[in-house]
Amino acid sequence: MRGIEDVLSLNEAASRAEVTPERLRQLIEAGQLRGKKIGNSWAILTSDLDLLLGRERLPGRPDERKALESRLRVELRPMSPISISLLPYNQEIRLWFRVDNRSDRFVELDRMWVEVWYPHPVVEGAIVDRFDISPNQFIDTPMFHAWPTDDKAAMMRRAALDLTQFAELQIYVRAYFNTEIGTAAVRTRITRQKGEFPIQLPPLPSDEVKSKQIPG
């Protein structure tokens, strides 16, 4: 029989998952998280939330698992890792990642959750393909692909064109690995400054181009 500590409200579950209650409700409605509607509230089992977050782990050996997680790396791949198009007919973001397994264990990359900010949140989503990574090897094929909405794309265009605005591309990644000692979880934040990555922008009217020219 489940205790009261095994059941979370929507707000409690959102706080534990570090997302908004609205985002968690979307996951429930999309069938990615089990939840039971009770009146105007939601009840979510801790075990179901932990399964979604990749926290289902074998008992014991926390130090061993922590040591393994410290040897798993997620970063952008070195060659052409970012492709952003903000053209009106083709608004998309593509990111390619390099995942390093610097341990002596075989691991399987189960999934990655990616959030992109520029300068505010613009897209989020998952890479659900699974990849085997041998000991002391890496892969550079995981690719995140998302389409910002019109309002988000417009915000990104303004940030890219406004020379007075500080705009940093921020990429938050949560990666989950299947291993022989349970699920390993790695979180990382990747940043790139304006001018350090390419953005395809629609052409500006000539008068606007003149107004944005920087004196030599």
Image: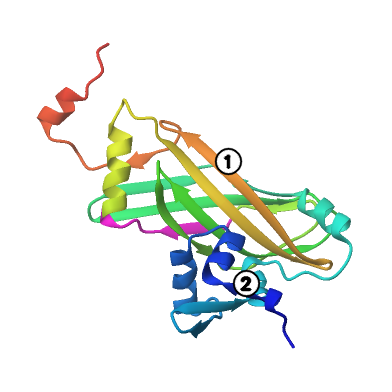
> Magenta segment: does it hold 149?
yes
| Residue 189 appears left or right of 92 | right
| Residue 170 appears left or right of 6 | left
Which residue was labeled with disc 1? 78
Q: CA distance from mark 2 to mark 1?
A: 34 Å
Quadrant into which the C terminus falls: top left
Select label 2 or label 1 by which is in front: 2
Identify which amino acid the numbered label 2 is placed on: Leu
Seen as rendered, the residue at the extreme left is 207
Seen as rendered, the residue at the extreme bottom is 1
> Magenta segment: does it hold 156?
no
| Percent x, y of residue 30 | 45, 77
Q: Check disc 1 and report its element: helix, strand or loop.
A: loop
- Please name the residue shown 72% across and 84% down the image: 2
Crowdedness near tag 1: few (<14), some (14–19) or many (≥20) residues, C-alpha within 10 Å: few
Name above or below for residue 117 compared with residue 64: above
| Foreground of the two, 67 or 7 | 7
User: Which of the marked residues, 2 or 1, is nearer the chain's N terminus?
Assistant: 2
| Percent x, y of residue 19 | 52, 59
Name above or below for residue 44 compared with residue 70: below
Name above or below for residue 137 compared with residue 17: above
The image quarter containing residue 56 is: bottom right
| Residue 59 appears left or right of 7 | right
| Foreground of the two, 188 or 74 | 188
Q: Which residues are magenta?
A: 141-150
Identify which amino acid the numbered label 1 is placed on: Pro
- Please name the residue shown 48% across and 65% down the image: 21
| Percent x, y of residue 215 | 24, 13
Q: Is residue 76 visible?
A: no
Quadrant into which the N terminus falls: bottom right
| Residue 94 appears left or right of 71 | left
Which residue was labeled with disc 2? 49
